[in-house]
Image (cartoon, coloured by chain):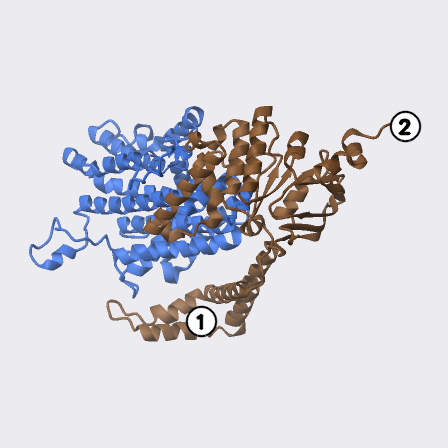
Amino acid sequence: MPSQAPSLPFLSRGQLFVLGGLALVPLLDFLLPSVQLSAQMRTVVVFAMLGLGLNIVVGWTGLLNLGIAAFMAIGAYAYGILTCEVYPFQVGFWPGILLAGAIGAIAGFLLGAPTLRLRGDYLAIVTLGFGEIVQDSIKNLELITKGTEGINPLPAPWVPGPVASGEPGGWQQLFEPITSETPVRWFYVYLGILALAVYLARNLEFSRLGRQLFAVREDELAARCMAIEPDKAKLKAFAMGAALAAVAGAMFASGLSSTGEPANYDFQVSILALCIVIVGGIGSITGVLVGAIVMVGLSNVLLPNLTQALQRSGIGSTGSVFASPDNYKYLIFGLALVLMMRYRPDGIVHSRKAVRK
Amino acid sequence: MSAPLISVERVTMRFGGLTAVKDVSIDVAKGSITAVIGPNGAGKTTLFNAITGVYEPTEGAVKVSGRDPRRALGPNVVAGAVATGVATGVGLALLVRVETIWQASVLDLYEFQKAFPWGAAVKAFLVSLFAGGFVGTWLPILVGVVLGAGGRLVIWSRTRRTPDVVASAGVARTFQNIRLFPDLSLVENVVVGMDRRLSSGLLGGIFRLPAAVRERNAARADALTLLEFVGLADKAESSAGNLPYGHQRRLEIARALASKPDVILLDEPAAGMNPTETVDLMRLIRSIRENGTTVVLIEHHMRVVMGISDRIAVLQYGEKIAEGTPDEIKNDPKCIEAYLGKEELG
């Protein structure tokens, strides 16, 4: 007699392992105090969040979205407008990040509602165009978005806890914003948000809607004949992916304390997010986390630090472009992609869709 | 006799110049096993596709329990179209003059680090939104309403009779060229088939609300029972794509049964099965009927067809050439001719 449905653990072993590993990163700050690794690893967390959103759309629903960066931009600018003191809203970090997610979901809904009936390549072209339109709109709506200047300053997360620097005393101190002197706490806040998103995404994966998405990806007509409405399922997936991407954008902007310029959210970012999903293992949450650590860790943490170390040691100080590993970024990316496609086309972490319990 | 569960009423399917099904009428009685047979290319699968909503019949209608399953022009559709139209219209008007409106309702009123007059801002927003005159406000609203409401209605009119609507009316089917979800486990495949009976929504799933968890556990338990019914329970957690062919056919049947349909349409369920599997299949189809589900099947194995059917309809070149009990069909000269060819006389 087959057993009853097993109860679902909150996170899978792989997810716990990767998140736990990330939680140990601040320990390295003690070993390498000059590097400030936990400040740099924030970017990895942000891109893991972006990958998580894209994975719902590309990995689970099978829709090629080449404009995920646009939703990241929408989230970043929504967060900027809602929290920056040059605008009247000033809602603060947590409401700001939630509202950014909600605005992202609405944007995803608005883009998806008329276009999700398009198939395959046509949808990819629409999302690609949307990415360009959003970037250009932000650049040109100078009254609202400050054009290429970017909106700043933006608040850092706001959590209870002692502040590393500052006047002692006063209960308000508990609620003071995180500053650039508290990168460890900042990192943990971001990691906490990511862990929550992983938990929610995992719930989605095993929910009725998750199953509908998988069915639509595998065989849309068969899914339709099972009384599933693919258009509705796709729209929900698209909106949720956009919401996570927008939250990633808000975290990105808060991390920079500025939305930066619109070019921060260009096609390259969409491709990077796609690479994270594909390299990590398409359809797997653990894969997305690993993909973000590998791709962004390489390009934003490892290579720049290596370059700096080389310069400090005097080897690269001559200014030779060949002596700075940072310049080999795309060479390494390309090589890695070729090798991946040759030896492990399913990604670093195989998504084991079949043994979903 | 009570009203037929499915009545195909003078259905014609034309693809350009090709008439695949021509003026076919078949009634399927509740609780019966009806077979549709005919040589290859006779239009049997096309007929199934017309019944299940994959195709819209060029002429004629298919009724399920006396009703034509299609999305009605109800208050939902109208309200949806109106809401979409108004939202698109206002959104467009907002977009066209977004900077002016922003200037009037935010930048003009906000002084750095002073309290923001929210009431005045909302008023200024509304005033400036409608201050664009015909070209700035009313034309965009008009265009938006037409586009939004019109688009919504066009989509409604084109998706009136899609397979999900027909499936929701209690018609389940399998496919001639098996269409499982290969990367999902057997249980998951069956639970997808159950979707019509599930009610948990987006929030219940994401936040793992107790009701959704209970529903999921119950659905999986049901799915295991169904897998046992078709004899696949021992492989419940392996992936559907790895099953042998005969098992895949039975999994498709389990998935179709999962929705507790009134009628199940089987498209060549015995294709590619060996004799033992075929006997098992006949037993399975009979027990499906005994559980109260009406069965319609397309089949080439005459042993299966003659062994289990109550009624048989014969198609040739898209036309129904005979209908009756297995004995009548066996002795019908037209059917013999269709299958074996005409005897040359002199």
Quarter of the rendering containing residue A347 = top left
Q: Are marks 1 and 2 in contact (CB under 8 Å)?
A: no
Instruction: Name the mark nearer the viewer: 1 or 2.
Output: 2
Q: Quadrant of the C terminus of chain A?
A: top left
Q: Which residue is mark 2?
A: B345
Amino acid on which disc 1 is placed:
Leu
Label 2: which secondary element: loop
Nearest to N terminus: mark 1 or mark 2 = 1
**Letter of the chain that mark 1 sits on in the rendering:** B
| Horizontal side of residue A322 vs B23, given as left or right | left
Residue at image location 38% in from the left, 48% down from the top: B215
Q: Position of residue B46 (x, y in %)?
A: 67, 42
Total count of labels: 2
Q: Does the image show residue A189? A: yes
**Letter of the chain that mark 2 sits on in the rendering:** B
Q: Colour of chain B?
A: brown
Foreground residue, A322 or A179? A179
Foreground residue, A244 or A302? A244
Residue at image location 47% in from the left, 51% down from the top: A235
Badge 1, how many Cα within 10 Å: few under 14, some, many 20+? many
Foreground residue, A8 or A314? A8
Q: Which chain is blue?
A: A
Q: Which mark is residue B129?
A: 1
